[in-house]
Image: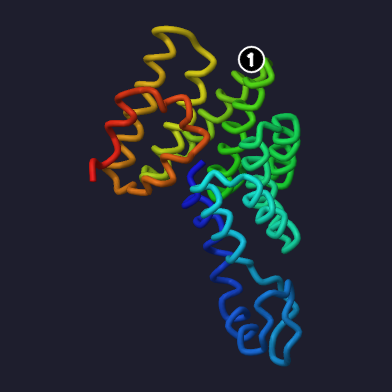
Amino acid sequence: MRWSRLYLVLSIASLAVGVGMANCKKHDCRERIECTAPGTSHRVVTPLAPLNAAYDALRARDFADMAAQADLLIAHKEADIGHALRAYAVRGQGRHEEAIIQYGTTMLLLGGAEGSDNIPLLADCYIGRASCYKALGETDRALEDIEAAKLLVGEQLKYRRDDSAHYQLACVYATESELQEDMQAARTRGKAIAQLRVAIAKGFNDWAHMRADLDLDPLREDPGFNALFPRN
């Protein structure tokens, strides 16, 4: 999972409520779901504070706090993002069955891959759920989700070849490598590292995120992965 993708998903919504949020701040409504001050409409304000806090919790691998921030997002009517983040958080706590349910909820809320903005988040769900199935010993289901994630990232790469897309493809390969053995697994880890190199060449520099990302855990012992990080 790369969180900058989530900011991209929310960017249009944030712009749409920008004027309304400014008015809300004037009337001290920043923590409310809807602003009822004169001159404003009854519209939902995107809660950026929980999103930023969840991002910080991911970097720290504080999955309990991340789950709490995800619940705040769900309460503020950001259900798809909230359930996706909660899935990631409970997965980090080893609660794989619950994570699978949360990933499935996000998929239902997204309603498929219609619209390019949905594709990265949907792909993240398949990657995360595949990891959970693997942890539960359900290899066939994990492989099915990996193939679905590959198709979605392939669609993403058709219209967006930025660092985020290549980072996500690296997450797919890293997760897939855990479902393989010996030389095949090593080759797939190599593919993941190659995609991270492309992402870095295209501007990726969020090293704290890369160090913490659950999706990249299968690469932690690979010298090629550790060589990607700056020395200073």
Circle count: 1
Say if residue 64 shows up in the picture: yes
- Quarter of the view holding residue 164: top left
Helix, strand or loop status at disc 1: helix
Give whichever of 41, 90 is nearer the camera. Answer: 90
**Image vertical order of residue 137 relative to residue 196, above or below:** above
**Residue drawn at x 47%, y 24% as measured from the top left:** 218
Q: Where does residue 71 sit, x and y in percent of width and height?
A: 72, 54
The residue carrying pointer 1 sits among few (fewer than 14), some (14 to 19) or many (20 or more) residues within 10 Å by Cα, namely some
205 vs 109, left or right, is: left
- Decide if residue 222 is on the left or right side of residue 70: left
x, y percentage for residue 17? 61, 73
Q: Which residue is tagged 1?
A: 139
Residue 158 visible (yes or no): no
- Position of residue 50 measured from the top left corner of the image (x, y, whole percent): 62, 61
Point 70% across, 59% down: residue: 72
Horizontal side of 128 relative to 227 (left or right) equals: right
Residue furthest to the bottom: 38
Which residue is at the far left? 231
What x and y, as percent, mark residue 25?
A: 61, 84
Place residue 20 in its image quadrant.
bottom right
